[in-house]
Amino acid sequence: MKVITANRLLNGDVVWLGENGSWVERITLARTFDGKDQVAEGLAIGQEAEKNQEVVSVYEMDVTLEDGVIVPVRLRERIRAAGPTTHPQFGKQAQAVSA
């Protein structure tokens, strides 16, 4: 299972491709893709958004579901999903988490 991720061009925030082609700031709201065709579809949406200068550095990443919650497989992606490696009160960690 995969999600499509990028950085928002306007402010550099990590974002994930959500439903209806929207870019969301919480991985829990990301759309998941299974199989090569679905992943290719997601990457095409991301590449179009990159062409329209909405996001940069679009790529796919592996995720799993743990208790119904999307969790990145690689440590690098877990760090990106959690927010900047700063004090917890300053990053995404300080925001209320909602599924």
Image: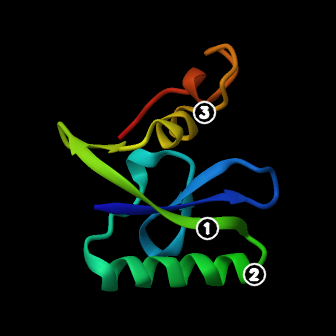
Circle 3 residues within 10 Å: few <14, some 14–19, many ≥20: some
Tell me which residue sits at (23%, 46%) in the image.
65
Is 35 placed above or below 31 here? below
Label 3 sits on a secondary structure element that is loop
- Residue 36, labelled with which disc? none
Alpha carbon separation for disc pair 2 and 1: 12 Å
Label 1 sits on a secondary structure element that is strand
Query: Pointer 3: what residue?
Result: 83
Q: Specify the amino acid type for callout 1.
A: Val
Circle 2 residues within 10 Å: few <14, some 14–19, many ≥20: few
Q: Specify the amino acid type for callout 2.
A: Asn
- Residue 58, labelled with which disc? 1
Circle 1 residues within 10 Å: few <14, some 14–19, many ≥20: many
Query: Pointer 2: what residue?
Result: 52
Tell me which residue sits at (73%, 70%) in the image.
54
Q: Specify the amino acid type for callout 3.
A: Gly
Label 2 sits on a secondary structure element that is loop
Which quarter of the rendered picture does the C terminus lie within? Answer: top left
Mark 3 and mark 1 lie on one chain; the one further toward the N terminus is 1
Tell me which residue sits at (50%, 26%) in the image.
96
Alpha carbon separation for disc pair 3 and 1: 18 Å
Of 19 and 42, which appears nearest the observer? Answer: 42
Q: Nearer the viewer, mark 2 or mark 1?
A: 1
Is 96 placed above or below 44 here? above
Q: How far across and how far down the image is residue 41, in percent?
A: 42, 84
Query: In the image, is 44 to the left or to the right of 98?
Result: right
